[in-house]
Amino acid sequence: MKKIHFDEFIATGFYVGYLPIMPGTWASWVACAIPLFLYELFPDEYRLLLSVFVVLFFFLGIFSADAIAIVSRRSDPGFIVIDEWVGQWIPFLFVLPNPTAILIGFIFFRIFDITKIPPIAKLENLGGGLGIMLDDVMAGFYAGIALYFTSLFIR
């Protein structure tokens, strides 16, 4: 596989980013399956495995998103969605996944990712693959905190 094809495969979230309407939302929803899958198969190692996924795909995302942004000549093309995957996984480091947590975590992440409350927008302005990834990482942490506190009241 040529490097650009690998970068495209990773940056587009295994080509989910090419869905025609709301690719970031679709990518976030698809990403929600990973925590459920990991927790179902490896409940004792869940947080460790999800942490490895977050770190691994964060760094893969930096390099692949940067390469694809350069090739496309766009600073943050909508079809790059690996940042949504990583950001969407972060809330489930705070709360174990179940159908309710997945839905609420998905909603919180999308709200923070779309509204870009401070300092999310500043992180996006860093540019390149790092900027593409960091704004969603911060949105994921905000969503994780919101999900954690919500989970104290909703079971």
Image (cartoon, helix red, strand yellow):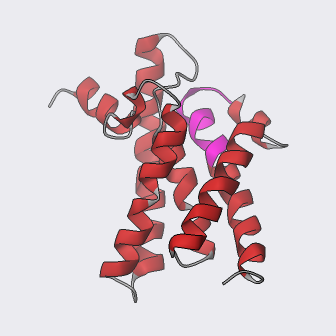
Q: Which residue: 41% across, 24% down?
A: 67
Name the quadrant of the C terminus. bottom right
Q: Is residue 109 above or below residue 80?
A: below
The single residue placed furthest to the top in the displayed view is: 73
Magenta-highlighted residues: 126-136
The single residue placed furthest to the bottom in the displayed view is: 44
The single residue placed furthest to the left in the displayed view is: 1
Name the quadrant of the N terminus. top left
**Number of numbered discs:** 0
Q: Which residue: 46% across, 43% down?
A: 27
Camera-side residue of 74 and 14: 14
Q: Is residue 143 above or below residue 12?
A: below
Q: Is residue 37 magenta?
A: no
Q: Position of residue 64 (x, y in %)?
A: 40, 33
Q: Position of residue 25 (x, y in %)?
A: 54, 40
Q: Is residue 135 magenta?
A: yes
Camera-side residue of 7 and 28: 28
Q: Position of residue 21 (x, y in %)?
A: 49, 26
Q: Quadrant of residue 60?
A: top left
- Our reading of the magenta stretch's main secondary structure is helix
Q: Which residue: 49% across, 10% down?
A: 73
Q: Position of residue 74 (x, y in %)?
A: 54, 14
Q: Quadrant of residue 134?
A: top right
Q: In the visual, does 91 lie left or right of 117?
A: left
